[in-house]
Image: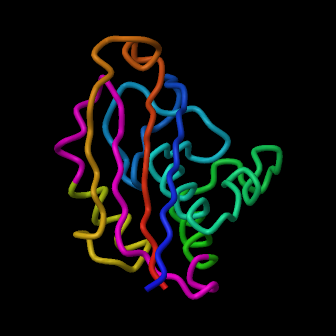
Amino acid sequence: MNIRIGNGYDIHRLTTDRKLILGGVDIPHTHGLLGHSDADALTHAIMDALLGALSLGDIGGYFPPSDPQWAGADSQVLLKQVHQLVRDRGWHISNIDSVVIAERPKLKPHISAMRDRLATTLTIAPEQIGIKATTHEKLGPLGREEGIAAYAVALLQK
């Protein structure tokens, strides 16, 4: 059996004039993430993990922030495109594990919805996606609530 593993990371600054989208879910909060697309840090980390597993670069190479066509883009649409690159090469997702780092809002009530949304986008079972949430214990820029970050690992099989 051929397997590949990739990891991904993303971070975005919080701002008052945007929605907070994580894992494709609109999460009620006073702040949202600043970015060229919808700034969904969790989905971006997952895309980079998938691309990294196959040595296909990173999302900036496919959806550069300098390209106006990606302004405000729905990251679930971008994730579908990345997943198609994986499938076109004969690979499928075994599982994804991730962690989101945010002081606020509390993400535990939204994890099930995020798993369901990502699973639908990727046409896999929600049980194949792990999402954990943690804080940064008030340390550094994440602890000061200046941003939200996400890490992801993807295991692919052929």
Query: Bounds of the magenta span?
Result: 86-111
Q: For this view, does 53 lie left or right of residue 97?
A: right
Residue 85 vertical position relative to residue 16 in the rendered view, above or below:
below
What residue appears at the point 28 percent right and 25 percent down from the top-left corner? 135
Residue 31 vertical position relative to residue 20 in the rendered view, above or below:
above
Q: For this view, does 51 lie left or right of residue 107?
A: right
On the rendered image, what quadrant is the N terminus found in? bottom left
Q: Position of residue 105 (x, y in %)?
A: 28, 29
Q: Position of residue 59 (x, y in %)?
A: 67, 54
Q: Position of residue 43 (x, y in %)?
A: 48, 53
Q: Position of residue 64 (x, y in %)?
A: 77, 50
The quarter holding residue 101 reads: top left
Q: For this view, does 10 lie left or right of residue 105?
A: right
What residue appears at the point 49 percent right and 23 percent down from the top-left corner? 16
Residue 145 vertical position relative to residue 153 in the rendered view, above or below:
above
**Colour treatment of the image:** rainbow
The quarter holding residue 143 reads: top left
In front of the other: 142 or 37: 142
